[in-house]
Image: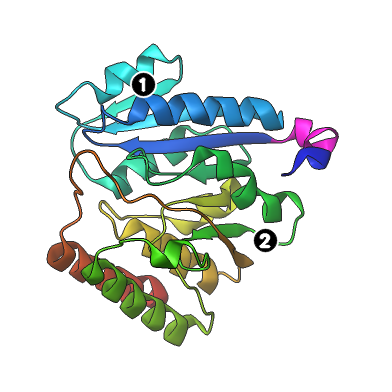
Amino acid sequence: MAKSKEDGEGKNIFVSVIIPVFNEEATVGDIVIRTKKTMETIAFRHEVIVVDDGSTDKSADIAQHHNVRVIRNGHQGKGYALRSGFKHARGELVVTLDGDGSHKPEEIPLVLRYLIQNIADFVVGSRFANSEVKKAKIPKINRTGNRLFNTLTGYLTGVKISDTQSGFRAIRASLIKQMKLTSHGYEVESEMLVKALRMGARVKETPISFDQRTMGNSKLDPIRDGTRIFYAIITSYLS
């Protein structure tokens, strides 16, 4: 997908891929293998970092077995895990994707493309920009919440984003360093996006595939986490 760039200047780009996990032993091994294969195929200098958020299963051990960097934290939440990964990342470009199998590592070139072309600083992989994904069985409460957060983010920032809650992203490390992130939970996606838009960063979306998890249980609580996301959007805009 981005082959022509990797053959030349792409080889000089260092990409950090950060995968936060919490009790994902059924999927993390496969995700790590596919991520490594994808990065080797597109020939970027790279590192894969799995941040284990205090899993009580073998998630961290399985990731370690596949020879990637593993950061082991106590159970603090997805936001804390990502912040920990950002702190240790060495790449000038950073990709984040979930470890539950809902994101396809093979699509990493899609979220990197606009950064490589230098027409964006922050790219969101949108589930809702893909007509096939719109037909997927994403729980109604999740779709409703996402629409609410999209509307609020657009109203405050003047930028329309179709999937503000997507965890599949690519961001310039220099931008992350300026954000001063504080989130511990799922609200981290909104905090990052709103702060980037407030800073004048070039934000673009790209369509991605999405597979609803078939193993394990979602850790997101629609009411509790939804409230935190709403609050994060407002405070990130006002900060």
Seen in the picture, residue 162 relative to 22 is either above or below; the reply is: below
Q: Is residue 7 magenta?
A: yes
Residue 38 location in percent, x, y? 60, 31
- Residue found at x 32% / y 31%: 27
Horizontal and vertical percent position of residue 23? 21, 33
* Image-quadrant location for residue 151: bottom left
Q: Is 178 left or right of 23, judged from the image as shown?
A: right
Badge 1 element: helix
Front one among 239 and 10: 10
Residue 48 — which label?
none
**Is the residue 88 above or below the residue 191 in the image?**
above
Q: Which residue is mark 1?
A: 63
Q: Secondary structure at mark 2?
A: loop
**Image point 64% across, 25% down: which residue?**
40
Q: Which mark is residue 120?
A: 2
**Magenta part of the protein: which range?**
6-13
Position of residue 80 in the picture relative to residue 118 (left or right) = left
Q: Residue at x 57, y 25 (%)?
A: 37
